[in-house]
Image (tube, rainbow, N blue to C red):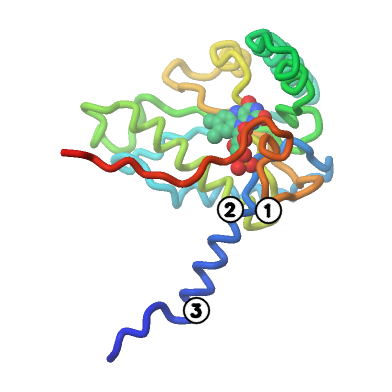
Amino acid sequence: MPDDGPSSAEATQASDLEKLLVWRRDVRHFDTRPVPEDEMDRLFAATRLAPSVGNAQPWRFVRLRTPALRTTLADHVDAAARQAGERYTQAEQAALYASLKLHGLREAPEIVAVFSDESPREGHGLGIATMPEALRYSTIMAIHTLWLTAQSRGIGLGWVSILEPDWLADLLDAPAQWHFIALLCIGYAKAPSDIPELDRRGWQARRDWRAHVSER
Ligand SMILES: Cc1cc2nc3c(=O)[nH]c(=O)nc-3n(C[C@H](O)[C@H](O)[C@H](O)COP(=O)(O)O)c2cc1C
């Protein structure tokens, strides 16, 4: 049989994946419309398909439900973002920073804190003797899997990192062996775009693709 390259089904799948990557955005402007529970189940189920060191599956997702917790978190992140803004001393950059929306915690229908278990029973320690951080990398893979799955279903996700991780772990009474990774806002985007918001707002454009080549 001659090799005719990818079949049309494979080509379609490839272009669907490309479209998904192009349209996956970090979302901060959310509709308050709830995400149906079966969709949330589907998102969390997809994380089972993510790779992980030793198959340890160290990701731990915590859904935050109460309005009081939402307000506490949003206030904390607003304060942390204001404080972080003090590093921008140039007036124009400081003004642009202050105008950016850096989280959707007040509007997103779903808020999820993600931790990585530093001593999971699963995996039996395989692969982490020299690089224990591989557990955290695994959790990040699960988040990306969730992110792409959400996007494929028309659901947006925003990653929030402007906070004090120890404060959040205490607030949620997280077990000591859980390392905080991310706070996620999940819901329907108000205005889907194929261009990152920070690019559209003039903060940071995408760089050209480039790989370094070893000289050795
Ligand atoms: C580890 C990580 C932390 C992030 N933290 C924040 C954050 O606190 N606030 C925010 O507005 N965006 C945050 N983002 C989203 C980035 O700003 C966004 O991914 C980047 O601007 C590129 O845009 P895109 O995801 O739409 O392609 C974070 C993204 C990652 C991967």
Residue bearing mark 3: 9
Check disc 2 and report the residue beneath it. 149
Query: In screen coordinates, is 141 left or right of 164?
Result: left
Do the CB atoms of the residues marked 3 and 2 lie less than 8 Å apart? no
Circle 1: residue type: Asp
**In percent of the image, x 75 and y 23: which residue is there?**
96
Question: How far across and down, in percent of the image, does residue 214 sit?
Answer: 23, 40
Q: Amino acid at mark 2?
A: Thr
How far apart in space, not on screen, are marks 3 and 2 (Cα)?
20 Å
Q: Residues within 10 Å of mark 1 (few under 14, many from 20)?
A: few
- Picture layout, residue 78 above or below residue 107: above
Where's residue 198, x and y in %? 67, 34
* The image quarter in which residue 125 lies: top left
Q: State the separation of the CA atoms marked 1 and 3.
A: 29 Å
Crowd class of label 2 (few under 14; some 14 to 19; many from 20; radius 10 Å) = many
Locate the C terminus by quadrant: top left
Give the residue drawn at x 79%, y 40%.
30
Q: Which residue is mark 1?
A: 38
Q: Secondary structure under badge 1? A: helix
Q: Find the residue positioned furthest to the right.
A: 32
| Callout 3 secondary element | helix
Q: Nearer the viewer, residue 212 or 11?
A: 212
- Of callouts 3 and 2, the N-terminal one: 3
Foreground pick, 94 / 104: 94
Between discs 1 and 3, the one toward the N terminus: 3
